Amino acid sequence: MAILERHDASAVAYLKMNAPSRLNALSDEMLAALQNEFDALAQDQSIRAIVLSGEGKAFCAGHDLKQMTAGRQAEDGGQAYFKDLFDRCATMMQTVQALPQPVIAQVHGIATAAGCQLVATCDMAVAAEGTRFGVNGVNIGLFCSTPMVALTRNIARKKAFEMLTTGKFIPASEAETLGLINHVVPEDELATATAELASRVAEKLSAAVKIGKQAFYTQIQLPTDQAYDYAGDVMVQNMLYRDTEEGISAFLEKRQPEWDQ
């Protein structure tokens, strides 16, 4: 049985982390599987949106602590392994945001530590009622420094610091209020609600969504004046697309656009 399962439907790729006995921890194997699949999806022009979920009773419980403990057996006490592990995880997370397709997390159960980081990294997230989120490494003496990077780019600074220093879990309703996730739905509606969101995204002009996603993450790191200069250039580039011209013409003529993509 594959540790990461994929099936495609209507231009949406559905990825499911499939290690329920380990709460879909980001083990070496899971990180490799996710990286490989995301790398493949980056080149797959037939896919316009991606949904990421977890099998079993949790979305993702973070790094695999048993593997990390085993890594300590090396002569350096695990230093090289830990550095490599966090580098590989950071690469995978950054790959998610570099993908041309929007990635939607479908979250249930718990999303903790690097699992919460994964939710924060995805472009959007839908969670089931009763889901809990935490960056709780501090409870075992490990401050969630790498999850902090994604978390602090999603929610208010003081709230993020409270979560990081207390290990406190927050419910899905609070996660939605803070901006960590987009929507909270009943658990039995989770898959349908996420699929509907992905389908709405997949209906749009893929070239526009691609350039827009790249611009979103680029401009947010820039000072306001530079962000406007950059975003203006992106708008010009987007306006010159043949399909954008067709989309505007179709709107003015009150008809459906005939896009090539």
Image (cartoon, rainbow, N blue to C red):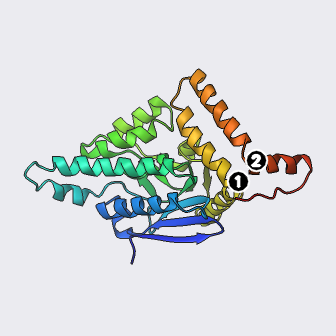
Toward which corner of the image does residue 168 lie, by quadrant? top left
Determine contact: label 2, label 1, CB under 8 Å. Answer: yes
Q: Amino acid at mark 1?
A: Leu
The front one of 211 and 111 is 211
The front one of 245 and 75 is 245
Helix, strand or loop status at disc 1: loop
Left or right? Give the position of 38 relative to 19. right
Residue farthest toward the right in the current orientation of the protein: 253
- For the point 52% across and 60% down, the residue is 43
- For the point 17% across and 59% down, the residue is 70
> x, y percentage for residue 68?
22, 55
- Distance in Å between CA atoms under marks 2 and 1: 8 Å
> x, y percentage for residue 103?
55, 54
- For the point 53% across and 36% down, the residue is 218
The front one of 253 and 131 is 253
Vertical arrangement, residue 125 with respect to residue 141, above or below: below
Q: Is residue 43 visible?
A: yes
Image quadrant in which the C terminus is located:
bottom right
> x, y percentage for residue 225?
60, 21
Vertical arrangement, residue 202 with respect to residue 240, above or below: below
Q: Is residue 113 visible?
A: no
> x, y percentage for residue 99?
52, 52
Q: Which residue is mark 2?
A: 244
Q: Which residue is mark 1?
A: 205
Q: Amino acid at mark 2?
A: Thr
User: Foreground mark, 2 or 1?
Assistant: 2
Toward which corner of the image does residue 67 lie, by quadrant? bottom left
